[in-house]
């Protein structure tokens, strides 16, 4: 704890424990083309050997390696991809193309660039001669029939779908979509079809989160905007049915119009509140009538950072994903930090010529910095440093998927 605030690791651990206790067990079968972004509910095992038969990795000539001592070799057959060749005549070679099955009896391929076609139609191979097995993709070299190739809990993306397709898996069993009830709070927040009145701002968090939740494969029920009125918030929460998570923004700090924590404390359970991070300090986590609640702070950059670092891994863990740590890498800072911060900071940053540079406006109320940035840079708490200090940079590509 840092001055009564939870560290991000403590908050993540508590959220993961909550997620583990409420993993989604239901699954559905979906066509491969519809499976992008979903999470496997059961492992994918190879239904066939991959490749199903030995084949050539090159355009060239296939032969038995032992016959190289007898070269030049006559060409006894020509094998294109998709053909089903008969056995190789002993002492000969076969003209072969990439992806074509090796004829029984052949064990090696030499690429055509290293082969010379003689006047009499025979082929001589250039030194150095290939080693046995060269340019042959062996049967089951990628996967043996029955072998697990994608584990349960794997998040499916283009590469996983490609692999499943190469095994002929036309449908996959995936965890059912999470149902997220999305709620925006604040007397000042208006929808985009309204003209802005005095003191009002447009609801940006709704669009940020809705798009992100869709990418995470969630079904989103939009509960709209609620005023800063505890009775109305409670009534709306009471009306939520069948959601796995209530995700709200705003109304979580200690201002006089911040009611979510209060409602959870009185009518539900407040699991934690307030983190030692910047932006994003007043994150609220709890449950209301048995439904998990995550209340993100309303400032758009705070919403972004807390969703990326806490809500996103929580949602994925509920779907059964184990590997959640976003890949980051260390980049030397381009700036000094002469006064240590008591909270860990996540700043909008780019990597430029091997150094991490910051957007000029790091206000938690500002989203423009995030559209400029390629990721977040983590600035450790309680540490001052000079330019050159290695800092962890987490690309948005890791977080926004
Ligand atoms: P709050 O967490 O309610 O104290 O809000 C913090 C800041 O975020 C205030 O400036 C709010 O106006 C702003 N804010 C809250 N909700 C939204 C929203 N949905 N879209 C844009 N800004 C918001
Ligand atoms: Mg508010």
Image (tube, rainbow, N blue to C red):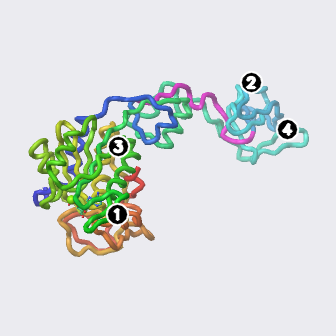
| 49 inside magenta stretch | yes
Cα distance in 3D space between marks 1 and 3: 26 Å
Give the magenta part as a residue range: 42-60
Judged left or right of residue 270, residue 98 is: right
Q: Position of residue 123 (x, y in %)?
A: 82, 40
| Residue corresponding to mark 3 | 220
Judged left or right of residue 142, residue 323 is: left
Mark 4 or 3 closer to N-term? Answer: 4
Report crowding for label 1: few under 14, some 14 to 19, many 20 or more residues within 10 A (C-alpha). Answer: few
User: Which disc number belongs to residue 122?
Assistant: 4
Q: Which one is in front, 58 or 149?
A: 149
User: Which disc number belongs to residue 87?
Assistant: 2
Mark 1 or 3 closer to N-term? Answer: 1
Mark 1 or 2 closer to N-term? Answer: 2
Cα distance in 3D space between marks 1 and 2: 78 Å
Query: Residue at the location (15% across, 53% down)?
Result: 259
Cα distance in 3D space between marks 4 and 3: 67 Å
Cα distance in 3D space between marks 2 and 3: 59 Å
Query: Residue at the location (11% across, 42% down)?
Result: 267
Check whether the beta carbons of the residues at disc 4 and disc 3 lie within 8 A of each other.
no
| Residue corresponding to mark 1 | 195
């Amino acid at each position: 704890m840092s001055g009564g605030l939870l560290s991000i690791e403590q908050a993540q651990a508590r959220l993961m424990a909550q997620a583990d206790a409420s993993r989604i067990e239901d699954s559905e079968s979906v066509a491969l083309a519809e499976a992008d972004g979903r999470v496997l509910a059961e492992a994918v095992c190879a239904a066939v050997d991959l490749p199903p038969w030995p084949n050539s990795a090159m355009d060239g000539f296939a032969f038995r390696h032992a016959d190289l001592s007898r070269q030049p070799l006559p060409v006894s057959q020509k094998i294109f991809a998709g053909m089903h060749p008969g056995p190789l005549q002993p002492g000969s070679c076969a003209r072969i193309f990439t992806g074509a099955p090796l004829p029984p009896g052949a064990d090696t391929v030499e690429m055509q660039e290293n082969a010379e076609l003689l006047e009499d139609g025979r082929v001589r191979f250039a030194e150095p001669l290939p080693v046995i097995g060269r340019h042959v993709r062996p049967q089951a070299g990628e996967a043996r029939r029955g072998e697990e190739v994608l584990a349960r809990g794997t998040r499916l993306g283009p590469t996983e779908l490609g692999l499943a397709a190469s095994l002929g898996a036309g449908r996959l069993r995936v965890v059912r979509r999470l149902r997220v009830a999305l709620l925006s709070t604040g007397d000042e927040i208006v929808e985009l079809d309204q003209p802005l009145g005095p003191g009002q701002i447009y609801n940006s968090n709704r669009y940020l989160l809705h798009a992100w939740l869709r990418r995470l494969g969630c079904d989103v029920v939009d509960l709209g905007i609620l005023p800063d009125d505890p009775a109305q918030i409670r009534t709306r929460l009471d009306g939520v049915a069948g959601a796995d998570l209530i995700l709200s923004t705003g109304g979580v700090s200690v201002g006089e119009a911040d009611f979510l924590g209060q409602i959870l404390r009185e009518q539900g359970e407040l699991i934690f509140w307030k983190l030692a991070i910047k932006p994003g300090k007043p994150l609220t986590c709890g449950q209301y009538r048995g439904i998990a609640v995550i209340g993100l702070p309303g400032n758009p950059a705070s919403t972004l950072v807390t969703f990326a670092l806490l809500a996103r891994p929580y949602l994925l863990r509920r779907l059964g994903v184990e590997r959640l740590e976003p890949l980051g890498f260390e980049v030397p800072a381009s700036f000094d930090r002469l006064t240590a911060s008591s909270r860990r900071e996540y700043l909008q940053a780019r990597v430029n010529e091997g150094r991490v540079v910051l957007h000029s406006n790091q206000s938690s109320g500002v989203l423009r910095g995030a559209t400029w940035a390629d990721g977040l840079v983590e600035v450790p708490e309680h540490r001052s440093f000079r330019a050159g200090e290695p800092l962890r940079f987490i690309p948005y590509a890791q977080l926004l998927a």
